[in-house]
Amino acid sequence: MRFYRFAMVFVLPALALAGLVTLVEKRTSAQSNAAAGAKDSYAFENIPRGFDYPAEEYKLIAYVDGENRQAIREHAWNLWAGLTAPSRSVWHGQRLPIYETWYSSQEVFDDHYKNPQFTEEARVFRRRFEVPVQALHMHQPLGTKAAAVMAFVKYNQAARDFIWNKRYYLRATLDETNRRFEQHASPIEQRQVDPFPHTAVALKLVYWLVKNPGSPQSQHGLTAFPYWDPNYPPPPNGQPPTHLTWSKCVAVDPSGKYRAGSKQKVNCNGTVEKPRYVDAEVVGLDRFYAYQLRTLAEVEDAKLSAKNVSGSGPHEQEAFVTDPGQVPELNDYIVLCGMHLTTKEMDNWTFQTYWWSPTPDASPHGDFRPPSVKGAWANYQMCTAYSMSTPRTASGGPPICFNPYLESDLGPMASYKLGDKTYPADPMAGTRSNCMNCHVKAAWPFQPPAGASAAAGAASAQPSSNYGRVFNDGYIGPNDPYFTGLTKTDFLWSLIFLSQPKQP
């Protein structure tokens, strides 16, 4: 991403600091009153009954065919309400939402690869972060250093069990599947892994670091939080609209020191040499799903991303988005910026994505949110991609659905060729992307050796990736020439990026 931002340094007197930390602890405890006195516990829970999951495929197809936007959005909001409903699990006195009990990518791929006898009883709750693979596969200059990244991919038990039972956590399984298709000269439309079960669900998450108000890294106890405005103009000099180019921020106040809704000056996407002060609306932690770093182990997990900042770049996707001038410390907070959610309720999966907004009820992305979405979770907006071709945009183009914290920086900064198509430089392409149109391209092998001949079998395939170069080109059928020599991975890039052993 494009330039560093550093928080203003403000050192509180010792007595004021002590009182402020005490106030923070009181406000934090308010988030977990329902779990007060409960012992730490952790076990998987699926989306409960009553949230229209899993929906019958014929119903969802009817919504798509009839372009019934309200019904589609109501279903996506119901999924959100179910995912974020309180679970029975408690951690550090805070009741976890349902999705926090799900299986991390490390549990699904790494742990089972290393220990096939891995059991439910062996699970330990941990938010395990890593630099996403997407940041490591760029074919173009990355420009300046990016913000820190934390990867977070989660699966429900149906998806995990399927990956385990089919041994899709192993690259060898994918290689052998593709080899058989090559050996038998299988038609393109038949070249695919076995389909996931109807109940499978996968998530991507993105977070922000909010400094504890007693830290010198905070801005007078506040943290600047840039937010997406669809009316932002394209950034200058042909750069993609990453969160570091956004001109609007809120001021997150964990302590309650400032009146909510008041305006306070914060350095919003400026630098220490050239601060960019804006009058930002003060919002409390109660506007976010937040958790506090209460142990040194949690701080070290969070610091993993900060240590890898120099190796990161734009086009991150799963990300921990934060100010690279800040370092996670004890009593800091991690707040949820956004989430991708995909379910196998349809053969082509359903895709919906959610992100935090200071104006969550604004149309169109706040439309039809039901009363079942409560508390902090009602501060998120949402869009859906249940089709690659409908509903068309006002200009007649393919439908658009992107998460500003995940895709706004995915536009290519240089022209490139993929197969027989040449695509121009288009830094704003991420803001016109479509979740389904991207995921349909997921196929193995990821990157065949350069210059391989047709006699090399699978190695003759074109690269199975957009490498962060988003192009929303409408419907792509299962027999598209793009898949020549490849095995489709049922819309999941995670089978490609996370299968073991990983590439260096």
Image (cartoon, rainbow, N blue to C red):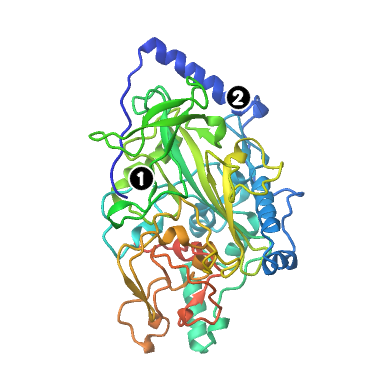
The residue depicted at 39 percent of the width and 44 percent of the height is 246
Q: In this view, does 496 lie above or below 189?
A: above
Q: In this view, does 436 lie above or below 406?
A: below
Q: Which of marks 1 and 2 is in front?
A: 1
The amino acid type found where label 2 is placed reads Ala
Look at the image and tell me whether residue 38 can be seen: no
Q: Is the residue marked by circle 1 packed among few (<14), some (14-19), or many (20+) residues within 10 Å?
A: many
**Residue farthest toward the left in the current orientation of the protein:** 273
Depth order, front residue of 431/483: 431
297 on left or right of 45 = left
Q: Is the residue marked by circle 2 packed among few (<14), some (14-19), or many (20+) residues within 10 Å?
A: few
Depth order, front residue of 234/374: 234
The amino acid type found where label 1 is placed reads Leu
Look at the image and tell me whether residue 228 can be seen: yes
Residue 101, percent from left and from top: 61, 45
Residue tagged by mark 2? 30
**Residue farthest toward the front in the current orientation of the protein:** 395
Residue tagged by mark 1? 244
Q: Which of marks 1 and 2 is nearer the N terminus?
A: 2
The residue depicted at 42 percent of the width and 81 percent of the height is 458
The residue depicted at 51 percent of the width and 89 percent of the height is 185
Residue 199, percent from left and from top: 68, 60
Residue 200, percent from left and from top: 64, 60
488 on left or right of 409 = right
Q: Quadrant of residue 349?
A: bottom right
Q: Quadrant of residue 361?
A: top right
Q: In which quarter of the image is residue 263?
A: top left
Q: Which quadrant, please, contains the C terminus?
A: bottom left
Badge 1 element: helix
Residue 313, percent from left and from top: 33, 53
